[in-house]
DNA sequence: TATGAATGAGTCTTCATTCAT
DNA sequence: AATGAATGAAGACTCATTCAT
């Protein structure tokens, strides 16, 4: 069996490939991997079904490439700017901004989040991608904190806990799972907790 | 049209139904819902394919009934004993025990966890089940704390955060996502954080 | 293979068999042969599914026995009284009564009619039954006419045509296929036609 | 969800679609709707099972489209020429020709006739098709008669009766249900009867 | 490159019939 | 004689992937 996935070199072909990824990833995020078929993807990408298999090994390939292409924007938008500076007394403010950023991001593409989170739990490769990026995110945040003169004292663990707290809060706010919770109070508690985590680390 | 889901009355039939649920739920948890077919389920349950549809509306039904039957044990084992008493100074110990319990539980059936977590993210009904139970769990824990003289001061929010912290820790410990983390330190940080949450609520 | 259809001798057993025939034939007439399953039949007859196969070779057997038992009442109620006498001048009246009788009969069990007519066209055995009875009916009517001093002059053919005319009229009246037809006029035309058929045969 | 019934555009595809209709309709007419499965249809059309569902919504769709395509030829061949002219004294001859035409037509595809007649009695949609065409046929015949200077005096009812007489005769001739009937006599009686129907309408 | 028609294995589900009790 | 649980073959339909053009 020869390897017949071509890496497109012409501009038009590249665009076509990206269109398929975009359309496919969107559909999968909206309706789920098993509820999206290649014909739909091709149609959405305004492309024939046959061509899909010239650019992609299989349906799964579309998903993973889509994740690579769009995943960062959706899940780890914070990865981008590592040069944030804040004053010690504004740690609160920094946290608040971070949380808002996170929440907004979730709100924008919450079906994508759901579907990908779903696959993380059942697909090793997707999980791998996610955990790798999560680690990058942790490192990125560590860097930011170090740049702002935090002590490197179990920083990995603390950052991980911190991100968990934020993610949990953010999830609650986005999906309103528990009707009787006060999000403002929750956010304050979370911020207070994070500050507690780092109480001895701000120089 | 005849009603064709039979509620089995004979002992043998009841056992068979349970066997199908067990086998089906196991397979689904192991391989995923879409990668498990009814023939496999029937075979695993040592039963003909036909009989499956006498006890269950469809394949999905097996999953939900399995969840109802095994879900509590897998996800919310703590729901059972609400009459825990501990002394103020032993809050640490209580937390530590709770965390160990959680972790062990995760370890025992981590594929089940993964698959169900997966479906929570893509299936409304499963999500519903989960969130309802999670709420029960929150309430149960609230009750325990109130019984141990904690103040009712934004208790829902605090318990939610607390459970999030534990869950996050536990997830990390079970799946070793990030190789270079020190779980003992993490646990201590988590416990410290939880204590911080309730710092003004222990009478 | 031994012949294991038992001819029930005990009263209770006979009743049970008849109940199955009744229930089965009713359901089949109402919903169609292929849309009626044995479980439904058994349930309607308040009998277990297993027992059905002690009295009947198969599902088809229920249908044919039902036809034998109820068919005459439904399709050929006129078979019963062959001793009708009428005066020459009352031939009209006789025809009118016959037509009314026919129409009422159709109206009472028109779904049965439909389903059986359907099977006549696709099932040789049912067709056979039907044509045999139709012949009996023709003969019976011939006899009546002969008893009333009609000449035996191509009587079979005439009676067949006559029955066709009545059946056609009756079908139209029962199912209202063509909205803009005046049934009274049709009936009069049919009667006139039948009288024309026999114009030279009334002695 | 993607629209998955394709209207084929390429010549080959169109031919294939027609081949499926033809093969499917033939099999259904020969063996009955419930005794024909999609695999057989595909095989008869020399096509894979999958392709069937690209051209047809479901098995039933094949039947109805087959009916649309072949139904007129089989059931209502007379619909085509409405410009028949005959002289008053040749009404006999016109009727005779019509009857022969009808009979030949029945003979050619009598299994199709049977199966479709069967479905008319059990399937609303098929019945609808049939009755609509029957009405067209009635109207067409009315037109012919009016064009030949027949009076419009309860013409609908008369034509309906006339067609019933012909159909009945034709059915008898085709299926030989009653062995001892003389078809020539029957035909003469039918023609005489029809003439009687219109006795006052020939200007 | 590109099309979209074609393939056929795979899936869920039904149901007439048989079997253990 | 009776029950109703059990069987398993068969059927309609789907869809990732390949092929002819």
Image (cartoon, coloured by chain):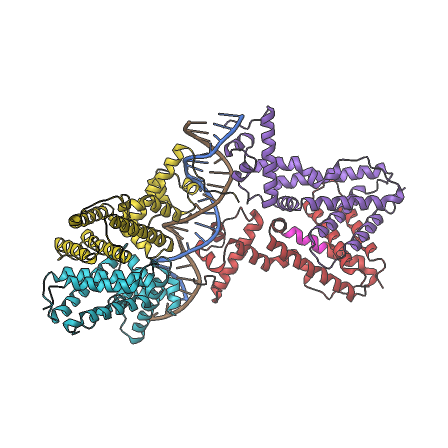
Chain colours: A cyan, B yellow, C purple, D red, E brown, F blue
- Residue B96 in the image: above or below residue D93: above
Is D110 magenta? The answer is: yes
Residue sticking out furthest to the bottom: A11
Q: Nearer the viewer, residue B127 or A121?
A: B127
Rendered image quadrant of residue C140: top right
Residue A125 is situated, as x and y percent measured from the top left of the image, at 24, 58
Q: Which residues are magenta?
A: D100-114
Residue C169 is left or right of residue B93, and the answer is right
Residue D78 visible in the current orientation: no
Residue F10 is situated, as x and y percent measured from the top left of the image, at 47, 44
Residue D28 is situated, as x and y percent measured from the top left of the image, at 55, 50
Residue B155 visible in the current orientation: yes
- Residue A12 in the image: above or below residue A156: below
Residue E17 is left or right of residue A201, and the answer is right
Residue in the image at 64% along x and 52% along y = D108
| Quarter occupied by the C terminus of chain D | bottom right
Residue in the image at 34% along x and 54% along y = B127
Residue in the image at 66% along x and 56% along y = D131
**Magenta span: helix, strand or loop, mainly?**
helix
């Amino acid at each position: 069996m020869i390897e017949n996935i071509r890496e497109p070199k012409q501009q038009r072909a590249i665009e076509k490939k990206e269109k398929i990824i975009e359309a496919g990833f969107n559909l999968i995020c909206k309706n789920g991997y098993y509820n999206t078929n290649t014909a739909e993807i091709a149609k959405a990408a305004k492309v024939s079904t046959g061509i899909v298999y010239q650019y992609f090994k299989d349906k799964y390939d579309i998903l993973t490439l889509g994740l690579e292409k769009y995943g960062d924007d959706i899940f780890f938008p914070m990865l981008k700017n590592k040069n944030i500076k804040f004053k010690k007394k504004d740690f609160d403010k920094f946290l608040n901004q971070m949380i808002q950023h996170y929440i907004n991001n979730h709100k924008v593409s919450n079906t994508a989040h759901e579907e990908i989170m779903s696959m993380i739990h059942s697909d090793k490769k997707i999980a791998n991608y996610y955990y790798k990026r999560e680690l990058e995110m942790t490192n990125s945040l560590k860097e930011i904190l170090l740049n702002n003169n935090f002590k490197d004292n179990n920083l990995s663990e603390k950052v991980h806990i911190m991100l968990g707290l934020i993610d949990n809060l953010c999830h609650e706010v986005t999906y309103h799972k528990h009707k009787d919770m006060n999000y403002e109070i929750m956010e304050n508690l979370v911020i207070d907790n994070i500050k507690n985590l780092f109480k001895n680390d701000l120089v």
